[in-house]
Amino acid sequence: MPTYVYDLNEGDTSDWEDEDLECEGRGEIEEHARRLLDEAGVRQAARGSASLPSTVVVYQENGLVVMSAHGWSGRTARILWSRR
């Protein structure tokens, strides 16, 4: 199963966090990206931060961008899949 790198920016900092995850296909990749957006919103609320959009960029192990997701916790995210 391929491994993907998820880079997350929570919108209220300039820091990017990353994690590696094995995913079987587009459905799993997108589901995890949406979960990260939701978790970022929960952390922002816990810190008392205003609800800011977060961004997730997903890379293959070789560095090619697969997709990006941008949005707020619990709301519709903008998903953009890269063309190969």
Image (spheres, rainbow, N blue to C red):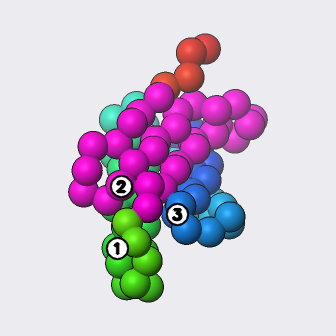
The secondary structure type at the circle numbered 3 is loop
The answer to whether 68 appears left or right of 79 in the picture is right
Q: Position of residue 56 (x, y in %)?
A: 52, 49
> In this orientation, does residue 7 appear?
yes
- For the residues labelled 2 and 3, the Cα–Cα distance comes to 10 Å
**Residue at the (34%, 35%) spot, across then down:** 27
- The boundaries of the magenta stretch are 52-80
Q: Position of residue 9 (x, y in %)?
A: 58, 59
Q: Residues within 10 Å of mark 2 (few under 14, many from 20)?
A: many
Q: Position of residue 77 (x, y in %)?
A: 35, 42
The residue pinned by badge 3 equals: 10
- For the residues labelled 1 and 2, the Cα–Cα distance comes to 10 Å
Magenta stretch containing residue 69, yes or no?
Answer: yes
**Residue at the (47%, 29%) spot, across then down:** 80
Q: Residue furthest front?
A: 50
Indicate the quadrant containing the C terminus: top left, top right, bottom left or bottom right: top right
- Amino acid beneath label 2: Trp
Q: Position of residue 46 (x, y in %)?
A: 37, 84
**Residue at the (75%, 35%) spot, across then down:** 62
The residue pinned by badge 1 equals: 42
Q: Is residue 83 above or below residue 14?
A: above
The residue pinned by badge 2 equals: 72
- Amino acid beneath label 1: Val
The secondary structure type at the circle numbered 1 is helix
Nearest the viewer among 73 and 12 is 12
- Amino acid beneath label 3: Glu
